[in-house]
Amino acid sequence: MSTQQMESRLRPVLYIIIQNNKDAEQVISIPGWDVKEVRSIESAQACIATQQYDVGLIQLEETSGKMLQAMETLITQHRAIEWVVLTNEACLQQTPFCKFIRETCYDYVTLPLSDSEYTRLLFTLGHAYGMARLTQDDGESTDDEYEMVGCSPSMMKLFGAIRRVASVDASVLICGESGTGKELIAHAIHERSSRASMPFVAVNCGAIPENLIQSELFGYEKGAFTGANKQKLGQIEVASGGTLFLDEVGDLPYDMQVNLLRFLQEQVIQRLGGNEEICVDVRVLAATNIDLDAAVKQGRFREDLLYRLNVLQLSPPALRDREGDIEVMARFFFDRFVSEGQARLKGFSQQALLAMQQYSWPGNVRELINRVRRAIVMCDGRLITPEDLGLADGVATEVITSLEDARELAEKEAITHAVQYCRHNMTQSAKLLGVSRVTLYRMMEKYSLGLSMETSVK
């Protein structure tokens, strides 16, 4: 491999060096990275304007209020970058400096670097890069604009399934709770299919009055009924060549289901008031939040129509089942909507993150987005609290029946808090808890916490 090819595979890192004593300046070697060294905030801004960075390293040994304010402004302006600070023990004795790191940075490493601290620095940079990439639109962890965000095993499985079903032209039934992103999945399938350049038409079957459903889906001819002053194409015909998405298909009136079934079987429609059969080439995706098998048994849904719609099936997981995704998604939506709040807002308090992890999220992703947006607007401080999210009284509690239960609950809460606080950095989590990594993993397995997934660095 040529030197040029090797360099193209290096991950870029912006290395900002700010030191009072220029004679004592020491630049840290960072193998495996394409390092851009700068010695002022102005130079850093210029670099960010011309190059995308997922990770920034700040060697900062100055604690003046003016410098911290300038650095905080830089970090706030570029929230997509994960920032790691290199500093000395003297700086860490200053309360404003510690607050700056806690509220704005991904992690810090203490100077001078011992061999173990140097190894930890390289690991921290890699982990920061992995966390930053979770919210990048790279086709793996994000999808479809901004709402489909996740890195949990269940979402990775869903993303893979979306790619597979997009490659064929069969009908797909998307089954899941309200707020899990069923329409986003339909969009993702369409955009990855051979029909991507053609129309995507969404119809909410539960939102159309019964007496208008037939004309809405199939259209009508001029004079078909009083007020039909001109011909109108139905949504099925409008979607010709592309994709028709029938949301809440379980709410389709029983009488109308036979008309939809005929279209799926024959790929022809008749406009209301017309006699001509019109061939329509369209792929049908449908979604429901009810149990259609139960609806069939209750006589509310046609079994033959269910077979036609349910050739392939996708089931987006509920938010409560997406291990590790809640914090990632909350931070992503915070970055998306932070401009709606006051300028000094920096992120979530640890209590807010813990409350979100413990909440059951009955409204799923839609509820998470709404709560985060509301908190951004209502928050008066620098960090969002459980009260801002409306979760102060919504934290799940466990019934304690013995001292053993109390001890186990305390251990589970301590582990959960530590792993979340350290952003799934297991080395830091174990250090914070005062145990070895082996002991931490053993305790997590004991309590089935499932928090041990660490982001792989590509």
Image (cartoon, rainbow, N blue to C red):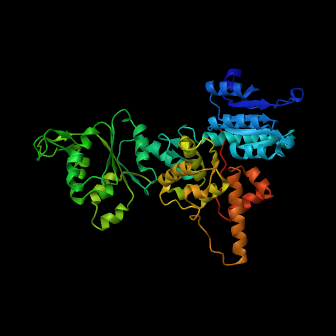
Pick the residue in front: 158 or 66: 66
| 406 versus 443 height, above or below | below
Apparent side of residue 320 relative to residue 164 in the rendered image (left or right):
right
- Residue under the point 83% across and 41% down: 91
Pick the residue in front: 120 or 311: 120
Residue 369: image location, x then y, percent: 51, 50
Residue 202: image location, x then y, percent: 33, 45
Q: How many marks?
A: 0
Residue 393 visible somewhere in the drawing: yes
- Residue under the point 38% across and 35% down: 196
Residue sitting at the far right: 23
Apparent side of residue 399 relative to residue 266 in the rendered image (left or right):
right
Residue 455: image location, x then y, percent: 65, 45
Tell me the quadrant of the picture where the N terminus can be found: top right
Pick the residue in front: 85 or 157: 85
Tell me the quadrant of the picture where the C terminus can be found: top right
- For residue 440, what is the image quadrant? bottom right
| 162 versus 18 height, above or below | below
Residue 181: image location, x then y, percent: 45, 50
| 326 versus 269 height, above or below | below
Residue 78 visible somewhere in the drawing: no
Pick the residue in front: 414 or 450: 414
- Residue under the point 32% across and 54% down: 249
- Residue under the point 15% across and 46% down: 272
Residue sitting at the far bottom: 401
